[in-house]
Amino acid sequence: MVAVPELISPRSPRVLAARRLAKRNFRGKERLFLAEGPQAVREAAAHRSGGAATLVELFATVEAAERYADIVGAARAAGARVHLAAEQVIEDISTTVTPQGLVGTCRFLDTPFEEILAARPRLVAVLAHVRDPGNAGTVLRCADAAGAEAVVLTDASVDLYNPKAVRASVGSLFHLPVAVHVPVESAVDGLRDAGVRILAADGAGAEDLDAELDHGTMGGPTAWVFGNEAWGLPAETRALADAVVRVPIHGRAESLNLATAAAVCLYASARAQRAAGGCRSVTES
């Protein structure tokens, strides 16, 4: 028997409820967000927060349900409601130009900042004044790839659950703890009290990343603070850091974009921490 979509009208109440999650005020009210595409939905289906499954509902075209039968099966196993939907319905829910046929609604999964501190992290990315959702999601992905234990978004940064940020994280949103709405002063003070050295990444920094590595000062627990895409970190935020570090430009490029600079800084710390004698945890001697 050939499967047929059960949701064919973009005006269906379920479809309208999902589509509203593209707007921040509705996300905040419902504490739900959209995850689009096979990678994000796969990770959402595997994720649990506070004992509850993160994926609540899955909309899939018939073709996508057949192509990604394993993901649909995982969604059902996680307790999510699965709806076969017409392509027009998926297009209406999706925020992408070319939807991949899978859209999930997920529960908020941010972690209280106090829990991140209690875990004694050794590598953290702090996004201060980062306004572009694509950059925020990409930095989160870089932090995940570099082995960071947490990401912190300050109260001046973009919404973690912006659909573009979720897509740019390519599933990494579901891999590591993320705290949101943390004042930058509170983030710095809390991390420092937890034994973490605070480094502000800035193109005009007095310290050079290569020199920091050469001097062996990056083996301990570290939090990198990254600023706005256009104007970097304000002076008052730089003043909070233990050091302001620039990524050296060895060629003729004017600068690095935010996500590239974040990747360089986070991987430099990760390598230093994994080197012989590097500090793996603030609780280790």
Image (spheres, rainbow, N blue to C red):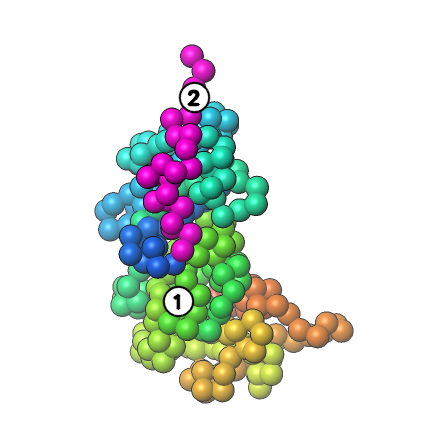
Residue 93 visible in this rendered orientation of the protein: yes
Q: Is residue 49 above or below residue 259?
A: above
- Which of the pair 20/49 is nearer the observer? 20
Q: Residue furthest front?
A: 11
Label 2 environment density (alpha carbons within 10 Å; few <14, some 14–19, many ≥20): few
Query: Where's residue 223, x and y in %?
Result: 43, 72
Q: Quadrant of residue 15?
A: top left
Amino acid type assigned to the residue bearing label 1 in the image: Val
Query: Where's residue 194, x and y in %?
Result: 32, 74
**Relative to 67, 185 lies left or right:** left
Q: Residue furthest right?
A: 252
Q: Is residue 190 above or below residue 44?
A: below
Residue located 49% across and 54% down the image: 164
Q: Earlier in the sequence, mark 1 or mark 2?
A: 2
The magenta segment is 1-23
Task: Give the labeled residue for mark 1.
Answer: 152
Q: Is residue 203 inside the magenta stretch?
A: no
Residue 285 visible in this rendered orientation of the protein: no
Residue located 39% across and 30% down the image: 7
Indicate which label's residue lies in the foreground, 1 or 2.
2
- Which of the pair 170/80 is nearer the observer? 80
Q: Secondary structure at mark 1?
A: strand
Q: Residue furthest left?
A: 51
Q: Secondary structure at mark 2?
A: loop
The Cα atoms of the two marked residues, 1 and 2, are separated by 43 Å
Task: Give the labeled residue for mark 2.
Answer: 4
Q: Is residue 14 inside the magenta stretch?
A: yes
Query: Where's residue 126, x and y in %?
Result: 43, 70
Query: Where's residue 38, x and y in %?
Result: 48, 39
- Which of the pair 196/275 is nearer the observer? 196
